[in-house]
């Protein structure tokens, strides 16, 4: 009896070791990283965001996308927060960062944290925690994320940011390839794209899709839905295409699986949203997520954690920036 309990324990230990070893990118991160140096960090993030979210219900979407765009360019290192100078266009000046909002919310959280635990908590970790809160407050899963990321002292150039971020008209194969680089399975890649259950897309990013001839256009589009999109984003509206926008799914403030049902009904906004239900590698995954929200939430949680491991700086790498908007 005691022997079998012991060997079970032994097996569990081995399995844990293997899990840790096959996940090299998470090395240096831990679930109790700030227990001694800033024990209330997660509470502070949550408290500041409660007021940010109350005053602007569109901010959870903005913060979730902000994390993706930080992590995709030189890793989850807080570099997207660094202000460009007119003489030196940085990440934020990249055209694919069009529509990125709410970076000031991270500055606000950081300033509160600096009062309680100066010089301890990275902007990179705050950004990941803010995205995690954004998902939870919108009705999505509560995701535990390991912490201990450090900040890059500098931002990428706008050119390299544009080279690393996906274009608005990326298709399924390229998107699966992009997320496979972060260690995601096809199921996790589809799940992370379920982030488009929140927020908006500016007309700028759908004009090509709407006004290309039918033969060239990828992904199905329901004719009624197409008509609605064209009313919001008319072809001649070049001047306002950067300010007019459409909802990514009808429940734009709710993190739910409607995104998948909506995509199956031919109402995906971007090419990727429209193609996911049609592509042989992703059809059945979209159907499963559409039928079972818990399944989506569970896959989203593991995908989110993998995204949060992208190119992290840990240990003695990088720095802890005092002000998130300023490089060193
Ligand atoms: C193949 C990958 C992806 C592509 C091509 C893509 C593209 C886009 C585009 C073009 C927009 C509209 C931006 C605008 O017009 O303001 C958008 C919005 C958004 N994306 Fe993605 N995205 C991708 C993956 C992701 C991932 C991985 C996440 C999060 C983990 C994400 C979260 C969001 C959110 C929340 C919005 C709404 C933002 C807002 O309301 O301000 N996206 N995406
Ligand atoms: C709209 O935004 C894009 C991308 O940032 C930019 O290149 C373009 O000049 C803007 N157009 C207008 C009319 O402001």
Image (tube, rainbow, N blue to C red):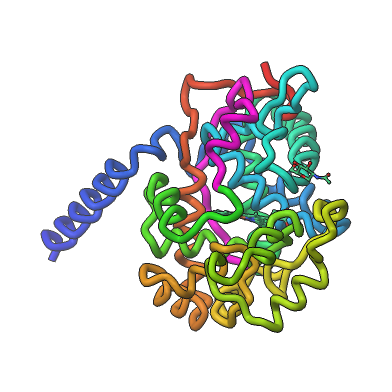
Q: Is residue 261 magenta?
A: no
Q: Is residue 165 magenta?
A: yes
Provide residue 240's location: percent of width, then percent of height.
Answer: 86, 55
The secondary structure that dominates the magenta segment is: loop
Q: Please give the name of the residue rendered at 66% of the width and 58% of the height, measured from the top-left corner.
A: 208
Q: Please give the name of the residue rendered at 83% of the width and 53% of the height, measured from the top-left corner.
A: 238
Q: Please give the name of the residue rendered at 21% of the width and 49% of the height, measured from the top-left corner.
A: 14
Compared to residue 298, the image places residue 307 above or below, namely: above
Provide residue 284's location: percent of width, then percent of height.
Answer: 40, 77
Compared to residue 159, the image places residue 174 above or below, namely: below
Q: Is residue 121 visible?
A: no
Q: Is residue 154 left or right of residue 310?
A: right
Provide residue 282's location: percent of width, then percent of height.
Answer: 41, 69
The number of callouts visible is 0
Provide residue 184's location: percent of width, then percent of height.
Answer: 39, 53
Compared to residue 222, the image places residue 31 above or below, namely: above
Which quadrant of the frame does ligand 1 lie within? bottom right
Closest to the observer, 22 or 101? 101
| Quadrant where the image shows the N terminus | bottom left
Task: Classify residue 120 by image quadrant.
Answer: top right
Closest to the observer, 55 or 15? 55
Compared to residue 301, the image places residue 90 above or below, namely: above
Q: Is residue 216 visible?
A: yes
Q: Is residue 6 left or right of residue 33?
A: left
| Quadrant where the image shows the C terminus | top right
Closest to the observer, 249 or 46? 249
Q: Is residue 85 left or right of residue 129?
A: right
Q: Please give the name of the residue rendered at 50% of the width and 60% of the height, measured from the top-left corner.
A: 301
Magenta extent: 140-166
């Amino acid at each position: 009896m005691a022997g079998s309990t012991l060997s079970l324990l032994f097996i569990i230990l081995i399995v844990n070791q293997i899990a840790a070893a096959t996940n090299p990118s998470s090395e240096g991160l831990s679930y109790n990283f700030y227990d001694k140096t800033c024990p209330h960090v997660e509470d502070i993030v949550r408290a500041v965001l409660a007021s940010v979210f109350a005053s602007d219900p569109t901010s959870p979407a903005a913060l979730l996308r902000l994390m993706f765009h930080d992590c995709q360019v030189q890793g989850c290192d807080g570099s997207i927060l660094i202000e460009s100078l007119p003489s030196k266009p940085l990440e934020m000046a990249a055209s694919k960062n069009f529509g990125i909002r709410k970076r000031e919310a991270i500055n606000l959280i950081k300033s509160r944290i600096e009062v309680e635990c100066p010089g301890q908590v990275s902007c990179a970790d705050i950004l990941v925690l803010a995205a995690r809160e954004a998902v939870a407050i919108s009705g999505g899963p509560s995701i535990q994320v390991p912490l201990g990321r450090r900040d890059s002292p500098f931002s990428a150039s706008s050119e390299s940011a544009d080279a690393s971020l996906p274009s608005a008209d990326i298709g399924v194969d390229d998107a699966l390839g992009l997320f496979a680089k972060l260690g995601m399975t096809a199921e996790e890649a589809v799940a992370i794209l379920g982030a488009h259950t929140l927020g908006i897309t500016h007309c700028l990013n759908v004009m090509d899709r709407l006004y290309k001839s039918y033969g060239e256009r990828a992904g199905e589009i329901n004719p009624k839905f197409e008509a609605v999109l064209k009313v919001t984003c008319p072809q001649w509206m070049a001047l306002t295409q950067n300010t007019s926008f459409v909802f990514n799914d009808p429940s734009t403030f709710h993190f739910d699986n409607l995104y998948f049902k909506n995509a199956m009904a031919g109402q995906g906004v971007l090419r990727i949203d429209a193609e996911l239900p049609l592509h042989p590698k992703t059809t059945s995954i979209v159907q499963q997520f559409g039928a079972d929200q818990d399944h989506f939430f569970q896959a989203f949680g593991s995908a989110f954690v993998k995204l949060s491991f992208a190119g992290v700086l840990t240990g003695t790498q990088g720095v802890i920036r005092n002000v998130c908007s300023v490089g060193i």
